[in-house]
Amino acid sequence: MALDNNKSLAKGVDWIVILIYALLVSTGILCIFMVEYNPDANVLASFFSGKTDYSKQIIFAMICALVGTFILLSDSKLYTAFANLLYVFGIFLMLLTFVLGKNVNGSKSWIPLGGGFNLQPAELCKIFTSLALAKYLSMQDLDFTKVKSQAIAAAISLAPACLSILQNETGLALVYFSFFIVMFREGLPGWILIVGGSFAALVIATLIVEPNTLAIVLTLIAAIAVYILRKQIKRSKVILYFILVLWVGCVGIQRFAVPYIFNNVFQCYQSTRIYSMVGKEYDCSQNRSTQKREAQDKKVTKPDDYNVRQSKIAIGSGGLLGRGFLKGTQTRGKYVPEQQTDFIFTSIGEAFGFVGSFVFLSLYMFLLYRIIWMAERQRSTFSRVYAYCVASILLFHILVNVCMTIGLFPIVGIPLPMVSYGGSSLLTFTVLIFILIRLDADRQKVLR
């Protein structure tokens, strides 16, 4: 009987996803090795020493392999049964960081576990949020067209994001907005996406265009809208009032709200990184945090866009085919900060060039395609929603991390899935993916 169960388990598992996962984890270890390689050290011994980052990543990978195997042997009904409880546990862990948290690079989002290992609850909470959102959206009596249902789903997604912001983990907080992609798949109105996109465009325009010029452009757009809709306005003045309120809101955002946020809410380095993304320089003398810091500390530091400039130099130096394995001057020379974590993609770009980077990113794209294909073949709403959660989180991480390294997105500290160094990150993506594989293996069941 046990043999039959093992055979059915092996038959239901999507081994293609496991293979892609293994290739990405192996690529990550290889990239970390390229960055840390010391020709004077015994390479074989260093791989098992537990003292180098790549040897630690191997230990993390072995632990994750055991966790993945355990998940494959588990009952898929466990994830529906404990989804809400796990979510509450994740929120509790994030709250615990405010009491027991360890400050790492200015972020108090880590819980020390001893032996040099730390746990980042904000990473693990992505798993719990995915399960909780899938549980909620798969409720039989749920009407997702109602505002109340949409608000509850948004609250489930954004509660961990709010805690991440309080922990000074802006990058991880942004990841939780990827759950809105899942909600759109499940019926969230498209106008919300339009409003969100329009707001983002207005913020970017505020950074690029001179304030008075942008105000004139917004006024002209409003005037043109009034002229085009003049017949409808004659029948109903509500349209005119709506255009005027929208115009006042847009001008108010670009003249007052955006400058206030950049000068009073964001830190100087955050504002500088966002401005550098659009090719502009930010005047830190206007920033309140800078004024406070200058009163206490006059030390000279590296420019806030130093990481991006070094990253672009490293990737650009790779050219078409790359410099070759262990031959990268920028990554091997430690010119790029956070090389093993947030900027791990630069080692691929410099060593293997455009062709290697394209092959590497194609591996990610195939994984995303496979996950979406798996999502659409599920009979259970819970499994489908969870699969889209996994795809959305992966897509957000990949896009933001790669765009960050080439200067198309501000530096927000988001790791590259399965590749960047870090036990919490690797464990999170391992659990996310292997729960999906377990649910997919039982896709003939209707889970709720």
Image (cartoon, grey):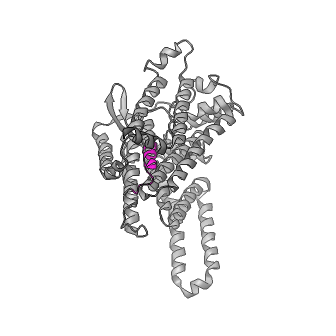
Count of residue discs? 0
Q: Which residues are magenta?
A: 433-446
Is residue 445 highlighted in magenta? yes
Can residue 306 be seen at all in this image of the molecule? Answer: no
Q: Position of residue 176 (x, y in %)?
A: 44, 51
Please identify the quadrant where the C terminus is shown: bottom left
Can residue 173 be seen at all in this image of the molecule? Answer: yes
Horizontal arrangement in the rendering, residue 370 relative to residue 357 (left or right): left
Q: Nearer the viewer, residue 448 or 415?
A: 448
Furthest-front residue in this view: 1
Q: Position of residue 131 (x, y in %)?
A: 38, 51
At 55% from the left edge and 60% from the top edge, which residue is drawn? 197
Please identify the quadrant where the N terminus is shown: top left
Q: Nearer the viewer, residue 285 or 191?
A: 191
At 52% from the left edge and 66% from the top edge, which residue is drawn? 190
Horizontal arrangement in the rendering, residue 318 relative to residue 384 (left or right): right
Q: Nearer the viewer, residue 362 or 334?
A: 362
At 54% from the left edge and 24% from the top edge, which residue is drawn? 33
Furthest-right residue in this view: 320
Furthest-left residue in this view: 99
Quadrant of res 427: top left
Look at the magenta stretch and give its main secondary structure.
helix
Is residue 320 highlighted in magenta? no
Q: Position of residue 218 (x, y in %)?
A: 60, 66
Q: Is residue 299 above or below residue 384?
A: above
Q: Is residue 252 above or below residue 307?
A: below
Quadrant of res 314: top right
At 56% from the left edge and 28% from the top edge, which residue is drawn? 31
Q: Nearer the viewer, residue 191 or 412?
A: 191
Q: Position of residue 345 (x, y in %)?
A: 58, 35
